[in-house]
Image (tube, rainbow, N blue to C red):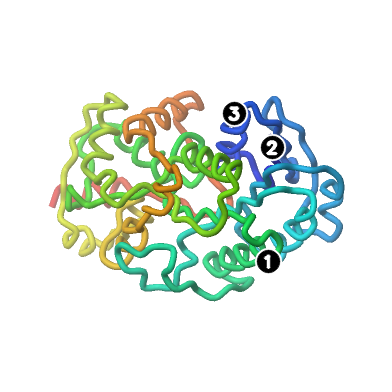
Amino acid sequence: MDVLLLGGTEFVGRAFVEEALALGWRVTVFNRGTHEPPAGVTALRGDRSREGGLEALTRGEWDVVVDTWSWAPSAVREAASLLAGRAGHYVYVSSRSVYAPPVPFGADESAPLTGSGDVGYAAMKAGGEEAATAAFGERALLARAGLIIGPHENIGRLPWWLTRIARGGPVLAPGPRELGVQYVDARDLARWCLDAARRGVGGAYNVVSPPDFTTMRELLETAVRVTGSGAELRWVEPEAILAAGIEPWTDLPIWLLGEDHAFMHGADVSKAVAAGLTFRPVEETVADTWAWLRSIGGRAPMRPDRPAVGLDPEVEAKLLSA
């Protein structure tokens, strides 16, 4: 199989490249060349945001195209239109943000969608879906991912928890302990998308783990175990955390409550599971992410277009001493 990856090769794109190479596929990457291409791939250069930026894609044929674009949907429209006659399948890595809020717990792919447009992450992802489908029809696979974690994460959510827990001492652990957490390891996302595209699977799929796959307790206790720090998890009720002005998701990554939790951690994924989506154990994802962090000196790279996440140590200490 020949696969073309449109986009960066830092996190999700990197997972696609590594999984495709592991399958023995021939891999071509197309991007601006900000980072060195992975070994074993063919690199094409171009800037999708500029006129004439797709020149390098005017030649060539591929069995599968993977597009991770998250900005103005016109870039997806132009690339998909250009490649529709020379590529078999188009995988658009979308997001569950395309659903119109509020998204109830247990919502599946039939939930109402938000409007598409050029402003706002959700609207741009929705526009990307429309563009991919317009060009490829049933040959477009729309992978609506939720929380994506794993090695090479450049958003900082799981890396922040691992770094904080590795520091040791009392750690603010947001309750309730058994609060469900739903995510997908980037490698599982990539593997399923590539295999599904190979089999000709099209349409929209929620690509995350089941809602009961893990909990805050299991996730954080696993982080304590794999780091070997001996950190003490101090479980605090949500009311006390919110009263201290601490924000879910940004100050305490992954943790969400109420409607936000129902949206991010409550998707019905039965359609994707029936189509072959599988999930590696929580401990494997956490341990592999920690091993990667250690290999690069303990500080994860961060995307410049995303805000930093994590709780101020002084704020944490003040709440835990109250």
Q: Amino acid at mark 1?
A: Ala
Residue 81 position, x and y percent, is 76, 60
3D distance between C-alphas at marks 1 and 2: 31 Å
For residue 45, which quarter of the picture? top right
Label 2 sits on a secondary structure element that is loop
- Would residue 127 be found to the left or right of residue 277 on screen? right
**Location of the N terminus (image quadrant):** top right
Q: What's the residue type where badge 3 is placed?
A: Leu
Of residues 28 and 288, the one nearer the viewer is: 28
Please state which of the two labelled residues, at mark 1 or mark 2, is closer to the viewer: 1
Residue 24, disc: none
Amino acid carrying label 2: it is His
Quote the CA–CA distance across marks 3 and 2: 23 Å
**Residue 218 quadrant:** top left
The quadrant where residue 18 appears: top right
Local crowd size for mark 1, using a 10 Å CA cut-off: few (<14), some (14–19), many (≥20):
some
Can you see residue 257?
Answer: yes
Residue under the point 50% across and 73% down: 114
Give the residue pinned by disc 3.
23
Q: Which residue is mark 1?
A: 134
Residue 279 at x, y percent in the picture: 38, 38
Q: Residues within 10 Å of mark 3 (few under 14, many from 20)?
A: few
SS assignment at label 3: loop
Q: Give residue 117's position: percent from left, percent from top.
A: 61, 73
* Nearest the eye: 232 or 45: 45
State the residue position of label 2.
Answer: 35
